[in-house]
Amino acid sequence: MKEQFKKILVLYSGGKDSSAAAVLLAKKSYRVILFTCEAGPSELTGPLGDSAPAIRHGELLNAFPNNIDKQRIFQDDSYLIRKLAIEKTNIEHVVYPLALALAVHTTAICYCLKNNIKIIASGYSGYQAKKEKYVEQKADFILLTKEFLKDYGISYLTPVVENSEAEINDILERDGISSKSLENKTIFSGIDFNQNKALEFWQSSIPICKRFIKNSIG
């Protein structure tokens, strides 16, 4: 991999949106490092190579061998999920999609600080943000996420945030990437989240995330 490529960490679920984000960034000559968080033991997360992230990672490597890093980064964010969601259940109104998003972004910040990576990207998309169940992808929370990362000198990109689902499919298909839904569906489908409650939850959760980063980095 050529060192002149600027490194970027892409939060990668293996879904269509994060895969499309990786495609666009590869075409802009970034060195794309795919970052996948998995919570739980292997019997729950599944074997390596037999998952949506593994399948699409292979497709991305075939399409962009000089820009997609061969090694996908795996991190376990179970501890943060417990601190942000489970332990807070009896204390306040928990907005689980935000808890999961904060756990992933916080874990990614730690990885970037340890590995001198200055940019994180996600596959947050405009068509998902129109649905209340994807509260973490709404413009207000993307801005809050950018501010959170900026505190650590990290920029935040959302390459497909303006794209429709049809445009996402086209981005993938043009370079031979599967546009079928390989990923697991959200367990929060059909659940709408109150914006004010979500903001309150975010504000109470950020100190937990910052303590975790401080303890992890030292």
Image (cartoon, rainbow, N blue to C red):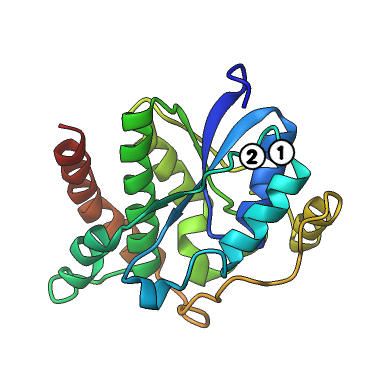
- Relative depth, front residue between 17 and 58: 58
As drawn, the residue found furthest toward the bottom would be 190
Q: Horizontal and vertical percent for residue 51?
A: 56, 68
Where 148 sits versus 190, above or below? above
Where 211 sits versus 15, above or below? above
- Relative depth, front residue between 63 and 95: 63
Where 7 sits versus 134, above or below? above
Q: Horizontal and vertical percent for residue 56?
A: 66, 58
- Relative depth, front residue between 54 and 149: 54
Crowd rating for badge 1 (residues with CA inside 10 Å; few <14, some 14–19, many 20+): some
Q: Horizontal and vertical percent for residue 47?
A: 47, 70
Rendered residue at 77%/56% (across/down) = 177
Count the labels in the image. 2
Residue 53 sits in quarter:
bottom right
Q: Amino acid at mark 2?
A: Ile
Q: Which residue is disc 2 drawn over?
A: 68
Q: Which residue is disc 1 drawn over?
A: 65
Q: Would you say 21 lies left or right of 210 here?
A: right
Crowd rating for badge 2 (residues with CA inside 10 Å; few <14, some 14–19, many 20+): many
Secondary element at image label 1: loop
Q: Amino acid at mark 1?
A: Pro
Q: Would you say 127 lies left or right of 40 here?
A: right
User: Quadrant of the image for the N terminus?
Assistant: top right
Q: CA distance from mark 1 to mark 2?
A: 6 Å
